[in-house]
Amino acid sequence: MTKILLATDGSEHSKRALEKAIKLAKKSEQTTVDMIYAVDGSKSKSDVLQYGDTDTANYQRLKKLKALGEPLREAGVEANYHIVHGEPAKAIIAFANERDYDMVVIGSRGRSEVQKFLLGSVSHKLVKYVHAPVVVVK
Amino acid sequence: MRKVFSKDEWLGNVRGDVLAGIVVALALIPEAIAFSIIAGVDPMVGLYASFSIAVVIAFVGGRPGMISGATGAMALLMTTLVAEHGLQYLLAATVLTGILQVLAGVFKLAKYMKFIPRSVMVGFVNALAILIFTSQLQHFVDETWVMFALVGLTLAIIYLLPLITKAVPSTLIAIIVVTALAIFMNFGVRTVGDMGELTRTLPMFLIPDIPLNFETLQIIFPYALALTVVGLLESLLTASIVDDATDTESDKNMESRGQGIANITTGFFGGMAGCAMIGQSVINVKSGGKGRLSSLVAGVVLMFLIIVLGNIVVQIPMAALAGVMIMVSIGTFDWSSLKTLHIVPKSDVAVMVVTVAVVVYTHDLSIGVLSGVVLSALFFAAKISKVKVMSLLVDGGDKRIYYIKGQLFFASVTEFLTKFDFSEEIKEVELDFTHAHLWDDSAAGALDKIEAKFEQHGTHVIKKGLNIESTELMDKIGGITKGADH
């Protein structure tokens, strides 16, 4: 059984990463894809303002994450969804290394050029610190 | 209630808390000075406040990892009090604010936060951002191009430096560069030193020098009340944001009480009232801080830097501070609220805009919040007071059945009563309440009235489908008004 971790932020690049993850998953039987989304401090501010409290915010995030993962279900791939909190690279690395993944898939860039610069490249840090092989999708 | 001296909350994250605390201290200094200037007091008043609040809240706060200090929201409320009555009254108001906040904590008022709609909270932060921005405009009056250039340079460094390195806070570098430039080039621009005295001493315990009588209370109470509300509002909002960012829970009533204790202490040590700071708390969490230690380190390092570097701090040009404040206001504004403007309900947008408009007009966040809450309550009442009544003639025209759907209460009964034809020549009407709920004595009264009016025309009334609560309500107060009619 193969386990893939797919990091996403809803950007175009992470949509392509999702397509790649589906292709990889289809290569072998019984593959599960865990989709993960990291909430950073600034996102906490706008989400708490929009949804009122952390429980509602998490519920809405999970709903959005599941919607993003719809192609997985359509392709018949078993999927799980996780929300983590904190600095995205750190939180995703910790999550990945605590569990036994055969592969981690991530888009090469975040939501925008500026954010990629400001937040540093999450994909770059994942390649460096995740124990499992990391696939960076361009 | 959680234990204050929880080992994990203090020592669970020492390295992260110490580093984040230092970063926060550096970011706190310019803000504390700028907020003092907004309030119209010496820079030391804000610096003492940030020191004392950050240190006290580390011990008694309910949300580890949250940063509190002198804030813009509170400073804006003090301006008039300081201008008309002076610093001593502000210190007394600060102590009174603390007492009221402790009471709010003891009586567990935090749960009433849920009555403040989210659109009001969004209006609150957006209005705060706008006020912080406009409070800086006075520094540009009658200034030369040098001022504008230095503010521009400050902002350029703040926003562009992170593209190269994030090792040092860009705000600090911006202040150092602009201050150095102003000193060496001898621009002669206004500096922090021109705005008031900066003494390099530790705060001392002092009882505010005011007459302790009813007249004093009359002066400070309205300010203290507004400070209490705004302080708790921003603190509890920030606590929820830190809850979310760290994925942990906090004790909101303990936080209310803690904010109170911090403000009481601060008032006696010559500081202005403060509360939690969204921006600084986000900086703290992003820098790796999440324990109580981070707030303690932030406060102590802040005071240490002021004592050591006080003579340099007074030479910071106002231009650098104005630049930092413009950055703070941009960071405070909830930009995502503009992006979702077209998808949220129109009434929510109206509440947000009205909250902002009232605050900008009155310069008082508490009045803005109150207006927002009242307006949303009115919108809600308007929405829910729509009662649907459909009717059907049966039994060969002898009987009419009214199907009633909706919430019957004081705001909906007037319109509800117009939906019946009391003069119709029939033997019997049936009122079907299966999809309705009676909420108050206005609803019970309306029902009695309907019955009475039909019976005056000799029409018999049957009530059907009342749910248990509504039946109980009718049993308790129904029949009273009907009896009075006869």
Image: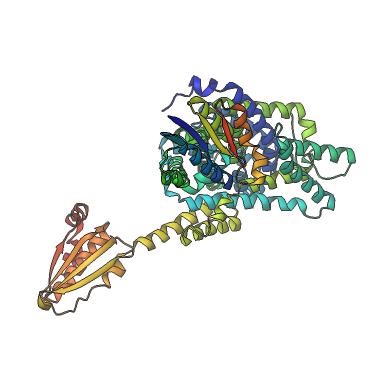
Residue A78 placed where, x, y %?
A: 41, 38
How is the structure coloured here? rainbow
* Number of marks in the rendered image: 0
Residue B229 placed where, x, y %?
A: 50, 45
Which one is in front, B32 or A116? Answer: A116
Q: Is residue B340 left or right of residue B159?
A: left
Residue B134 placed where, x, y %?
A: 68, 53
Q: Is residue B434 left or right of residue B264?
A: left
Against B435, is B311 above or below? above
Q: Is residue A126 left or right of residue B413?
A: right
Quadrant including the C terminus of chain B:
bottom left
Residue B422 placed where, x, y %?
A: 20, 76
Which one is in front, B207 or B211? Answer: B207
Which one is in front, A15 or B68? Answer: A15
Against B301, is A32 above or below? below
Quadrant including the N terminus of chain B:
top left
Please report the residue visible at 52 percent of the width from the left and 29 percent of the height from the top: A96
Residue B74 seen:
yes
Residue B305 picture quarter: top right
Residue B39 seen:
no
Please report the residue visible at 58 percent of the width from the left and 49 percent of the height from the top: B334
Which one is in front, B206 or B354? Answer: B354
